[in-house]
Amino acid sequence: MRILIIIVMLCFLFTSNSVLSETITFNYSGGITKVSTDNGLTWNYVKKFGNKIEINRLGGLKKISDDFGRTWRILYNHPVFTENYLSFYCSGNFLFIPEISLKNISQLRVYDSNGKYITDLSHKASELSINKIELPDFLINGVYFLCIEESSSTRIVCKFMINR
């Protein structure tokens, strides 16, 4: 009887894990090598196609490391944005977005931490380098979200903090 209970529990464990698994698709332009989870598991990416990479996760995806030693943290369940968003870094008046080319974007919108639209920076992206955006002075210290739309099918939301 105990063996039967253990077998049933193991079956439930494996089926519940398969239910939890999901696929995350985000923009990719080179360099990602592995994915680390909250429980310490690490594996290489699953599929690469075009300018996107598809990663299968089994709950608890914590961060993505690239070949250049940078870490992209993926956060979940934000109350405003339903899609996954990546956390990038800000230095002085510039926001640096690694591994994403900003040359062919259609929109580059900034939202505050409550999801309220503030401004569009798409004109700034074309003036600067591939992955660096000059931030306007009226963005004061705080947490913001940058919504990058390359086309109608590609949308990335990155979180950044300003501390001038």
Image (tube, rainbow, N blue to C red):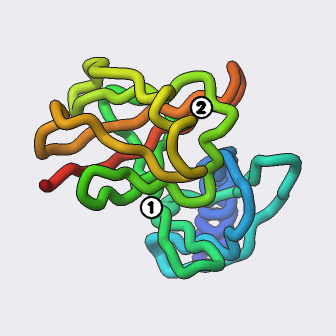
Identity, as a three-letter code, of the amino acid under mark 2: Arg
| Percent of width and height locating residue 81 | 40, 29
Q: Which quadrant holds residue 34?
A: bottom right
- In the displayed structure, 1 sits above or below 76; it is below
Q: Are marks 1 and 2 in contact (CB under 8 Å)?
A: no
Which sits in the foreground, 49 or 133?
A: 133
Q: Which residue is mark 2?
A: 155
Q: Which residue is mark 1?
A: 73
Question: In the picture provided, is 142 more to the left or to the right than 21?
Answer: left
The mark that comes first in sequence, 1 or 2, is 1
Question: In the picture provided, is 128 more to the left or to the right than 136?
Answer: right
x 61%, y 71%: residue: 35
Q: State the count of labels.
A: 2
x 80%, y 63%: residue: 46
Q: Badge 2 local density, few (<14 within 10 Å), some, or many (20+)?
A: some
| Quadrant containing the N terminus in the rendered view | bottom right
Q: CA distance from mark 1 to mark 2?
A: 17 Å
Choose mark 1 or mark 2, whichever is in front. Answer: 2
* Element assignment for label 1: strand
* Element assignment for label 2: strand
| Percent of width and height locating residue 24 | 65, 47
x 65%, y 39%: residue: 103
Q: Badge 1 local density, few (<14 within 10 Å), some, or many (20+)?
A: some
